[in-house]
């Protein structure tokens, strides 16, 4: 797990220096994979419809429910690599 964590940490740093800003759907995917990898399944109440950004983030994260943290890390790494 240590090499995967190191690669994940590197991808997180690289995600802040991408050549161009990803579209909103890709940003949501990056967010959801990061949260799933670092915190596990989404917890808490779904934000109300007036907070559209928080609701979109919650929904994106909720789609990954049950995904293993290591698997989410690898998908995050692969996604960041594809955006370079």
Image (cartoon, rainbow, N blue to C red):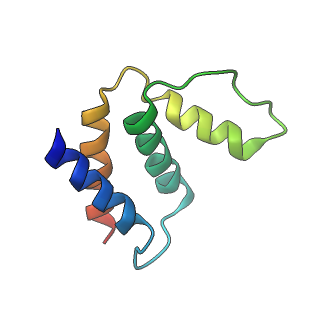
Locate residue 8, reporting x and y percent.
28, 52
* Horizontal arrangement in the rendering, residue 16 relative to residue 6 (left or right): right
Name the spot of residue 74 as percent of width and height, x first: 24, 44
Q: Which residue lies furthest to the bottom in this view?
A: 19
Taking depth in this image into account, of 65 and 44 the one nearest to the observer is: 44
Quadrant in which residue 15 is drawn = bottom left
Q: Position of residue 42 (x, y in %)?
A: 53, 26
Q: Quadrant of residue 40?
A: top left
Q: In this view, does 55 lie to the left or right of 43?
A: right
Instruction: Name the quadrant of the N terminus.
Output: top left
Left-right relation of 53 to 7: right
In the figure, is residue 24 to the left or right of 63?
right
In percent of the image, x 25 and y 35: which residue is there?
71
Q: In which quarter of the image is residue 69?
A: top left
The residue located at (30%, 72%) in the rendering is: 84
Callout count: 0
Q: From the viewer's perspective, is residue 65 above or below residue 24?
A: above
Asked if 29 appears above or below 20 in the picture, the reply is above
Relative to 15, is 6 above or below? above
List x then y, in percent, for residue 57: 60, 41
**Residue at the front extreme?**
2
Instruction: Note whether 15 is above or below 64 in the view shown.
Output: below
Q: Which residue lies furthest to the right in this view?
A: 50
User: Residue drawn 47% across and 39% down?
Assistant: 35
């Amino acid at each position: 797990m240590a090499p995967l964590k190191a690669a994940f940490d590197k991808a997180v740093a690289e995600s802040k220096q991408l050549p161009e800003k990803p579209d909103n759907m890709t940003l949501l995917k990056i967010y959801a994979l990061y949260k799933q990898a670092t915190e596990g399944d989404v917890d808490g109440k779904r934000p109300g419809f007036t907070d559209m950004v928080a609701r979109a983030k919650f929904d994106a994260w909720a789609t990954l429910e049950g995904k293993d943290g290591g698997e989410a890390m690898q998908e995050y790494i692969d996604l960041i690599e594809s955006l370079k």
